[in-house]
Amino acid sequence: MTDVVEAGLWGLVAGSALLLGAALGYGIRVPQRAVASVMAFGAGVLISAVSFELVGEAYDQAGLGPTATGTLIGALAYTAGNVWLARRGARHRKRSGHQPGESQPSEAEQGGSGTALALGALLDGVPESAVIGVSLLDGGAVSLVTVAAVFISNVPEGLSSSAGMKKAGRTRGYVFGVWAAIAAASTVSAVLGYTVVGSFSPAVIAAVTAVAAGAILAMLADTMIPEAFEDAHLAIGLITVSGFLVSFALSHT
């Protein structure tokens, strides 16, 4: 198996978790506390992966300057995109819609919100998938910790968001079409992360990795953690730390 194919397959594995979550969120009624708990756990896993697998690696490769610059650029780019999409109906794209005033709008309530929701899901998923491909550049083996972190976090994302889409009146075809497209985009992003970024110098690779890390951290703060806090606020700290430690242990075994 070539490295390019391997990058694509791992990206597809991570992206397929969105479809799994969508099936659960659209097909059955999952208790909100359970959704929030899994969201908090996934956030902890991603925080650890970003810290040790992305920012830590970028620092080892290029030092503090490129790492800090890339991280800030990633956060700024994500925030700008998120603000633009929020004004078009995608602000609560990861929300299940159970809280008043925090539900996804229907197309009748805000025209174009369906497209904005799809673009928001793409914005959230691309940085995560790209770093899977980039991780193959370090020794020729994918970072299983990064794949696991993205997979674990994608399940509650797909679950909560799909429940909100259903409540907003989105059709089954729209919901699963969006997540299937994002799973495909995850595959492409992982391949591009390996093929395109691999042609750069180590310093540039480190900076690109840091950009992805900044985008993921901004995504966590803007979308996943607020949703988790709504229903698991008394235990969110413990659950998030548990996810962090699981990912930390995986990265040091």
Image: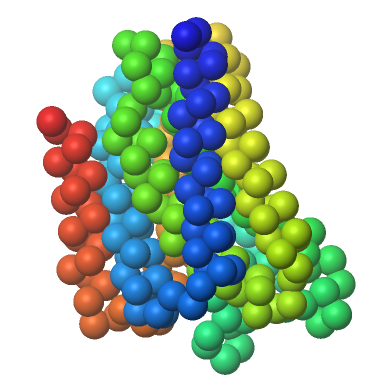
**Foreground residue among 73 and 18:** 18
| Residue 8 occupies quadrant | top right
Please determine whether, in this image, residue 159 is positioned above or below residue 46: below
Residue 95 vs residue 203: left or right?
right
Please determine whether, in this image, residue 55 is positioned above or below residue 76: above
**Foreground residue among 52 and 190:** 190
Residue 239 picture location, percent across and down = 22, 66
Q: Which residue is drawn at the image coordinates 81% and 82% (left, top)?
A: 109
Can you see residue 153? yes
Residue 144 picture location, percent across and down = 32, 31
Residue 7 vs residue 55: left or right?
right
Q: Which residue is drawn at the image coordinates 85% and 80% (left, top)?
A: 108
Colour convention: rainbow
Q: Which residue is drawn at the image coordinates 56% and 46% (left, top)?
A: 125
Please determine whether, in this image, residue 28 is positioned above or below residue 224: below
Residue 126 picture location, percent across and down = 58, 40
Residue 67 vs residue 24: left or right?
left
Q: Which residue is drawn at the image coordinates 38% and 36% (left, top)?
A: 147
**Foreground residue among 168 and 235:** 168
Can you see residue 86? no
Quarter of the image with the C terminus is top left
Residue 122 picture location, percent across and down = 64, 48
